[in-house]
Image (tube, grey):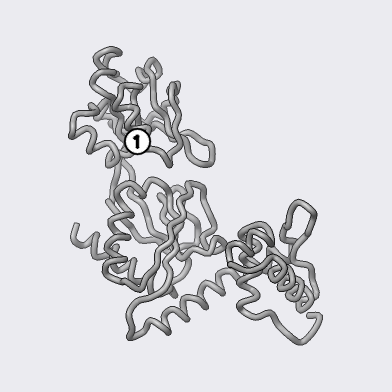
Amino acid sequence: MANNSEPSLDDLSLFLAVCRSGGFRAAAKLLGLSPSHVSETIARIEAQLGVPLFSRTTRSVMPTEAGKKLADRIAPLLAQTRAALYDATSAHQEVRGRLKLNVTGAVMVDILPPLIDRLLTKHPGVRVEVMVDDRLVDITLADCDAGIRYREHLAQDMIAVPIGPPFQHLAVAAAPSYLRSRGIPRHPWDLLKHDCVRLRFSSGALTQWTFEREGERLNIDPSSRLIVGVDAAAAAIDLACRGHGLICAFGNWLDPYIQSGQLEPVLSEWWHRFEGPLLYFPSRLMPAPLRAFIDLVSEDRTRS
């Protein structure tokens, strides 16, 4: 090191905020500080360590190799420190503090909102922030306490517990008016001849239309007359109800519309069944709000 002093925990947290946000001004806005204070703090840390942590240009601020390595090492340590402090202040007291989740949009329709409602009602001292992102995100670097993903998109080296239904399925449906005018598909390949309402992830990829029956599995890529981002899935379902084509989505999303008669199920014998979502987090040492949320999730699964 360049001198005997070491960066404080507050300074290191600010350093991680710059890494996450990609710039001094963005970090300053996130933390409610002035850009000059952020810049001066980073300069002080670099002087204390004796190495540059960021490459600065007029257009961007990027971590150096030393900066990336430092962020990777200290992010989980600071998260554990924050968890220990939360536990110390919450022991024998009301559960208080922030719960920040990074989740896929698939759980925001009917799985996560009721759980958050119950958490906030049971623990008035808890604040909840939900980041909806269908990309695989490093929840530690994103300053999140936990994430929710499906197993195939689950980050490695994480503790995971089921949340919501143990199993779900993809369903296909269309408005009765559409099926009367265009006919009912009898096989997944028939979908290639139909108008379809497709959903697109924030990554840019279209959601898969997967079918299975008696050991046979098919991935169909039908033409899309209409494409809607998954964040606006409710609008896509509404347009399908208005007769603009077949839609493939989570069965629990489409069930209310099927039950009301706005949509009719199609190819139900081919619907793909898969494991439900998982709540994941990096350590068993966790902040009190996350522990309270996990307890609530466990209670919910025990009742069901």
Position of 52 with respect to 234 (left or right) is right
- Which residue sits at x=40%, y=61%? 160
- Compared with residue 282, is residue 270 higher up or lower down, i.e. above or below? above
Q: Quadrant of the N terminus?
A: bottom right
Which is more toward the observer, 23 or 133? 23
Q: Is residue 96 left or right of residue 40?
A: left
Q: What residue did someone put label 1 on?
A: 249
Left or right of 137? Residue 179 is: left
Q: Residues within 10 Å of mark 1 (few under 14, many from 20)?
A: many
Residue shown at the point (76%, 79%) measured from the top left = 48
Kind of element beneath mark 1: strand
Q: Is residue 165 left or right of residue 281?
A: left
Residue 155 sits above or below residue 250 on the image:
below
Q: Position of residue 256 (x, y in %)?
A: 22, 38
Q: Mark 1 belongs to which amino acid? A: Ala
246 lies above or below 15:
above
Q: Residue at x 23, y 37 (%)?
A: 255
In this rendered view, identify the residue nearer to me: 223 or 275. Answer: 223
Query: For residue 169, which quarter of the picture?
Result: top left
Residue 184 horizontal/vertical position (percent): 26, 17
The image quarter containing residue 138 is: bottom right
Total label count?
A: 1
- Residue 26 lies, in percent from the top left, at 64, 59
Q: In which quadrant of the rendered image does the C terminus lie?
A: bottom left
